[in-house]
Amino acid sequence: MKKITLGIAAILAAFTMNAQTILNADKGVPFTNENNTSTAAAPNVATNPSPSDGETGVYIQHTFSTNSNGQTVTTRVVQLSWDAPTSGDAPAAYEIIFNGASLGDLGPASGETTPPTEVGITGTDITLGATVTWSVIPKNADGSATGSQTWSFTIVEEANINEAPNAVNSALTPVDEATDVEINDDGSITFAFFAAETGAPAIDYDVFFGTDPNNLTNRGTLNSLIGSIPVDASTTYYWYIVAKNGAGSAPASPTWSFTTAQDMSVEDFKNESLSHFVANGILTIDAEQQIEQVELYSILGQRVASQQEVNNKKTTMNVSSLQSGIYLAKVHAKGKTKTFKFVKK
């Protein structure tokens, strides 16, 4: 059995483990080139783009991303690929140009020596019916390829989608058969799932949910991969997703289950006062109960710091070395946990 205890951090940690190489065209965050191999000449050009130059009706899919506030959101992604140069010196990285803007250099993944020849692109330009341009410029220590072409393609319009989407087949959170799933302060749980990676685009998703696996009811339609739904404590729930578009509905996803955490009394840590503030790079946490442990997580679900055996009602942590952004603190006290967000400026 699997235990879920971290809310949105668990969502993003799970997403990170399943993530492909994706560039956000709105952010243009460069990739790090880890290949420092000495060469004698700049590489030749990349070829054979996919989607092909001038292609129309290109499919895009839903995926996860983070917005400027560090929140997890659903966005669209288009997959691009190309062939590496077949002659000349090897490239150490590829500069990705999308709609005229450089998204940075796509270098080898950690432990690899050659850069990948495919990437997913997200951003506000990835919408149904949009025409976009892109190019790939191979690079190495001696320079960049000359003569790289600019390609274009047009994403399928919603009205022209003529086949139903493929089925959703993987729950992100709660994971199947999870236990002790924490209930949000508003009495709901947050759920998320992965869209199909291939096939026609889904437009929205019907959510079937209930306590009887043989009689689940449609609880509404989402145009996102993330939702929330009211639940009771200490209860086992079942759910599945049906992806849809104008051409029809996909087969139902597998039916997943989870069990919510037990109800908490007024003496539990969740309902007791806990305050925090950040000043001059120091996170201060003050609780009514003796704090046992504090863990800090990035918005991608990666643990970035921890403090063990606090054994005090008040503690401080130096967060000055953390990059600016939104983080989650998980505080353990009296055998219970409390998770809150804070902003490191």
Image (spheres, helix red, strand yellow):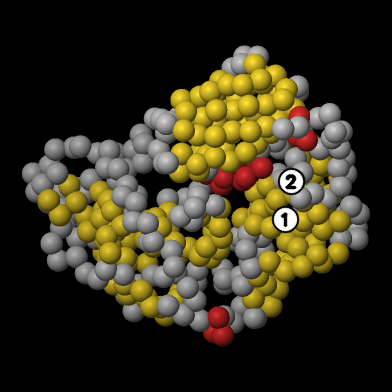
- Residue where numbered disc 2 is placed: 184
x, y percentage for residue 207?
A: 76, 63
Quadrant position of the C terminus in the picture: top left
x, y percentage for residue 119?
A: 39, 56
* Residue type at numbered disc 1: Ser
Give the left or right position of residue 214, taking residue 330 as reference: right
Q: How many marks?
A: 2
Secondary structure state at the residue bearing disc 2: loop
Give the left or right position of residue 149, taking residue 192 as reference: left
Residue at image x 55%, y 31%? 296
Residue nearer the viewer, 190 or 245: 190
- Decide if residue 207 is in sight here: yes
Residue at image x 47%, y 73%? 127
Residue nearer the viewer, 47 or 214: 214
x, y percentage for residue 209?
A: 82, 58
- Residue where numbered disc 1 is placed: 228
Above or below, comparing residue 217 to residue 311 in the picture: below
Say whether marks 1 and 2 touch (CB < 8 Å): yes
C-alpha gap between disc 1 and disc 2 = 9 Å
Give the left or right position of residue 303, taking residue 181 as reference: left
Q: Residues within 10 Å of mark 2 (few under 14, many from 20)?
A: some
Quadrant position of the N terminus in the picture: top right
* Residue type at numbered disc 2: Asn
